[in-house]
């Protein structure tokens, strides 16, 4: 399970690389929460964390672990009520998207964190535009241009996209406070870097969808025993809940999770 940390300093810089002087991604305020990305520490005294959808490194000296909000001593500054691993986007809001990494498979989550760090060091300002996507949202997007107005935006119906398995993310340029999908002119080089760095990280890209990166497995293996056995609690719980919810609504296509294995539990 991902660790949650609370900022103890008045202000703490979230930096691209684990060193003083590295470019600042964001400034976290005292009492703010950030989440461990699962990426291994590359520099003693620093942690790789996610904060409000942005990834970076923070000085561990000014962070304290928050195992449970209720376990804090009296007189401590209250911990915000936001959970370290947010629940899936409510099915009543399929137009909403998630950019948090908590519900991604831990192996893919770590690869994305490393990819973003390497892109930042190369001067390519990519951020996570969308990470995990509910099957309800996938259906809403798939219906666009087919059964509801708009242009077609995806080829994949529900459960035929790696997003539903926590094995895909869309990375988009974030420049001057705005998202940019522009891939011509000077910005074309950034998208070329995304493809190159994704390949170096062992990830797959799509020729028809430039922002998309995914774990290089088949859809059949996405819910197979290997990935199931290496999933963490947040990912496994979400996979079960999403599949059950989809089936109970009378829909087809959800993966069979009979091979589900939870780490750390002995067979019954």
Image (spheres, rainbow, N blue to C red):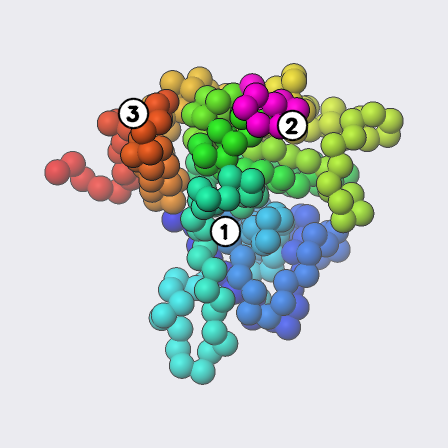
- Marked residue nearer the N-terminal end (1 or 2): 1
* Residue 59 rendering spot, x and y as whole percentages: 60, 60
Q: Which residues are magenta?
A: 145-155
Residue bearing mark 3? 256
Above or below — where is 129 with respect to 138? below
Residue bearing mark 1? 36
**Could you classify mark 3 by the number of other residues whose Cα lies within 10 Å: few (under 14), some (14-19), or many (20 or more)?**
few
Alpha carbon of mark 3 to alpha carbon of mark 1: how far? 30 Å
Identify the residue at horizontal 32%, vertical 29% (top origin). 250
Identify the residue at horizontal 76%, vertical 45% (top origin). 178
Q: Which is more foreground, mark 2 or mark 3?
A: 2
Is residue 263 something that shows in the picture?
yes
**Residue 251 included in the magenta stretch of the image:** no
| Left or right position of 195 against 132 | right
Identify the residue at horizontal 47%, vertical 74% (top origin). 78
215 or 65, which lies in front? 215
**Could you classify mark 1 by the number of other residues whose Cα lies within 10 Å: few (under 14), some (14-19), or many (20 or more)?**
many
Q: Secondary structure at mark 1?
A: strand
């Amino acid at each position: 399970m991902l660790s949650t940390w609370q900022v103890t300093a008045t202000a703490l810089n979230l930096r691209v690389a684990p060193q003083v002087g590295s470019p600042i991604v964001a400034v976290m305020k005292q009492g703010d929460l950030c989440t461990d990305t699962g990426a291994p520490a590359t520099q003693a005294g620093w942690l790789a964390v996610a904060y409000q959808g942005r990834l970076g490194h923070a000085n561990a000296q000014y962070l304290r672990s928050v195992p449970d909000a209720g376990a804090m001593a009296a007189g401590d500054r209250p911990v915000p009520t936001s959970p370290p691993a947010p629940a899936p986007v409510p099915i009543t809001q399929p137009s909403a998207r998630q950019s948090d990494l908590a519900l991604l498979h831990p192996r893919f989550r770590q690869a994305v964190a490393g990819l973003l760090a390497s892109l930042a060091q190369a001067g390519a300002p990519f951020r996570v535009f969308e990470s995990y996507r509910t099957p309800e949202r996938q259906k809403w997007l798939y219906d666009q241009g087919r059964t509801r107005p708009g242009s077609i935006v995806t080829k994949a119906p529900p459960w035929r996209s790696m997003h539903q398995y926590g094995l895909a993310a869309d990375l988009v340029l974030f420049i001057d406070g705005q998202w940019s999908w522009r891939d011509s002119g000077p910005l074309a080089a950034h998208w070329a870097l995304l493809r190159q760095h994704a390949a170096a990280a062992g990830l797959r890209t799509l020729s028809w969808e430039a922002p998309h990166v995914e774990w290089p497995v088949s859809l059949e293996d996405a819910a197979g025993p290997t990935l199931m056995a290496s999933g963490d609690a947040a990912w496994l719980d979400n996979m079960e809940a999403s599949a059950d919810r989809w089936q109970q609504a009378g829909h087809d296509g959800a993966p069979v999770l009979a091979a589900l294995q939870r780490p750390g539990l002995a067979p019954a």
